Amino acid sequence: MSNRNLIDLTIKILARARRELEYSRRFSKDASASLENLDAGLVDRSRKNGPDDKQIETLQRIVAAYNAAKADQADVADPYKPGGAWKEDMDRLRKPYIDALVAEDIDRLAHLLGDFFRNTGVSGLWTHGYYEKIKSGSKRRRVKYVGDLLEDHRIASDLLGEFDVSRLEIPEVGNPWGYTMKDTLAIPTSFRHFYYCRRFENLLRDTENPIVAEIGGGFGGLAYYLLTEIDGLKYMDFDLPEVLVVVQYFLMNCFPEKSFLLYGEERSDFLDKATLDKYDVALMPNFCLPSVGDQVADLLVNTGSLSEMDYTTVEEYIGQISRMTKGYFFHDNSDKAVANSEHSEVPSSAFPISPDLFSLVYKCQTPWGGQGGRYKEHLYERRSS
């Protein structure tokens, strides 16, 4: 081994030791840190009975929407087709879901979605560590996990002021897991999503029945808080069909009293204001973005995915965002051209956002695990005509 390589290896070992010392220090200094609370957060919360008639109807709608979307996906423009790491994720990690959806196997799909927080249903949509890694991990890994969640709690409390952690609680849909705080289950994404929700609540406080559109809404964590915290809010999400299956299951079971529009159902071909007035939530494949009416969204949100796309896709998405947004555009994305095995990330400063259409309200480093400081929050406001 050369002297240069030896020095690099030594630096990495010292950096890891320093991080582990910080994890232990953070854990020991926080009175709420407890591996017992982690064990309580890992308790099985699955539904013991099979799906009832209402849930079976929901699953049938999800299957129909998925297969309709996949039938039409082959003919969409290239920017709307999955590529890179996401295509690999779809083909490999979500194969059990895809097999059940294609076979229209409701029982198998109910089993998978009933446990989606603990299987590959949240692949690529999660933070701080997946279930099996934390459940069977070493004490060092578990201490780090607890420390990361408590650091998120500290950040959220610092930015938002102290709040009742019971507001973080989500329904036991999909067998959620995480860390218990004052008898409340906080899942790994809770603090970040709740923070975004409170920020957006301030932006929309003077808007009656606001319409929020999200590109890449994950499993629906942010949507859950928005729909819970903001009266009269209507929500749209645009994502890959395989991911939509999870958010559809989660939100439709969390809010059985709300009206949902899925792909292939009546009036899903053009999402204008009149159509959205008839529904509380619309959950559509990404290639439906061009079907949204002009300046429909009071707020459009994207976190952590635009910069992962290639530039031609970013250009197409920004064009649609610019057309359909009448209020604010918020995104939290990488601002450095970091290369991976498939492509180089598109820095957020290179997004083709027209200064004639939008003014930048602020840009700052994200507080949520900034990965070397490369992730930045951006808030744009549409200029008046």
Image: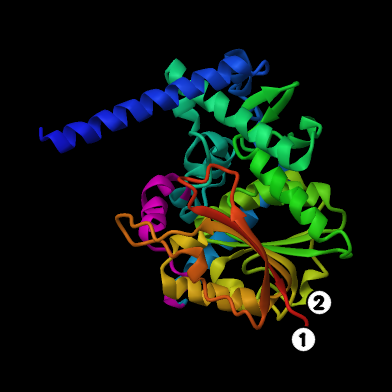
Give me the residue at 53% from left, 57% from top: 333
In this picture, residue 340 sits left or right of residue 77: left
Q: Name the N-terminal-most of marks 1 and 2.
A: 2
Give me the residue at 81% from left, 76% from top: 274
Q: Would you place residue 191 above or below residue 332 in this image?
A: above
Q: Residue 184: name its quadrant.
A: top right
Q: Nearer the viewer, residue 365 or 220?
A: 365
What secondary structure predominates along the stretch shown in magenta? helix
What is the x, y in percent for residue 73?
Answer: 47, 70
Magenta stretch? 77-97
Q: Which mark is residue 182?
A: none
Type of colouring: rainbow
Give me the residue at 79% from left, 60% from top: 203
Neighbor class of circle 1 (other Cα within 10 Å; few <14, some 14-19, many 20+) is few
Q: Is there any visible trace of residue 217 in the rendered image?
A: no
In this picture, residue 122 sits left or right of residue 363: left
What is the x, y in percent for residue 98?
Answer: 45, 52
Q: Nearer the viewer, residue 270 or 185?
A: 185
The kind of residue tagged 1 is Ser
What is the x, y in percent for residue 338?
Answer: 38, 57
Q: Residue under label 1, please give it.
A: 385
Q: Residue under label 2, please give it.
A: 274
Q: Is there any visible trace of residue 308 in the rendered image?
A: yes
Give me the residue at 29% from left, 32% from top: 11
